Amino acid sequence: EPEVTQTPSHQVTQMGQEVILRCVPISNHLYFYWYRQILGQKVEFLVSFYNNEISEKSEIFDDQFSVERPDGSNFTLKIRSTKLEDSAMYFCASRAGTGRSTGELFFGEGSRLTVL
Amino acid sequence: QKEVEQNSGPLSVPEGAIASLNCTYSDRGSQSFFWYRQYSGKSPELIMSIYSNGDKEDGRFTAQLNKASQYVSLLIRDSQPSDSATYLCAVSGSARQLTFGSGTQLTVLP
């Protein structure tokens, strides 16, 4: 069964360092997302990406964040200068279709980011 | 601010019972409604989607939608210990990204 894969599964970094989280979405999917979940809290939308550009982003997704699809398979989230409050599980998700299925997402297993 | 509210629980039911999970949403423009299951330490997994008023059944799961009351529910019949997880209600509307509720933690007791 096709799946979304994410690396690394866990990253520990010092405050102020840059972090890149990587995702390989399902191969025939066209829409890509990053969500995050702080421990014990809601799953929060960060950004959506379609046709090589950001289609929507939340207030959380400020200038410290960026996304890129550097080739035909990878989808990355970069945090330029990490803060303590960036510690969370980051989920990549993808979907194939349009219309009503906008919420039928396939999530990766997540990358846990710990900022010290 | 678009809100999705769920009873946080925890909700405990005996094995074989019906578990009932509820969700309300604030955005009247919402068009698509989803239930995701999240096991502890794992990622959300889609289990049901519903787009029209009424009931939608899939195996032991039934989703119910009432747009007038801005209310979505999930019934799990013949609950099993493997159903123990956090159930996330998610809503998509004019802003096409999903807005998640905080989840209801369900424990099915053997």
Image (tube, grey):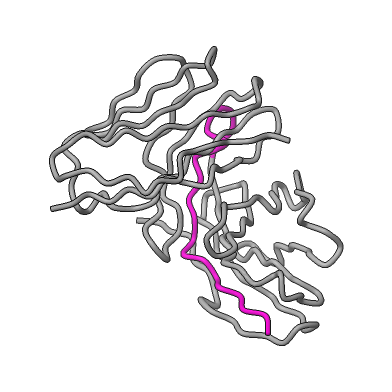
- Viewer-proximal residue among B13 and B87: B13
Boundaries of the magenta span: A97-116
The quadrant the N terminus of chain B occupies is top right
Q: Position of residue A74 (x, y in %)?
A: 62, 66
Whether residue A102 is in magenta: the answer is yes
Q: Is residue A4 left or right of residue B79?
A: right
**Residue B10 shown in magenta:** no
Estimate the x, y position of residue A69 in percent, counting from the top left: 70, 62
Q: Is residue B54 above or below residue B109?
A: above
> Residue drawn at (72%, 47%), measured in percent from left and top?
A51
In the image, residue B52 above or below residue A96: above
Q: Nearer the viewer, residue A8 or B66?
A: B66
Of the pair B66 and A72, the residue shown nearer to us: B66
Picture quadrant where residue A16 is located: bottom right
Q: What residue is shown at x 59% (from left), y 64% (from top)?
A: A90
Residue farthest along the top direction in this orientation: B68
* Residue A7 screen position, x and y as percent: 54, 75
Q: Residue B25: percent from the left, percent from the top? A: 58, 29
Residue drawn at (49%, 61%) of the image: A108
At x 33%, y 45%, the residue is: B11
In the image, residue A51 sits, relative to residue A3, either above or below, namely: above
Q: Is residue A49 above or below residue B64?
A: below
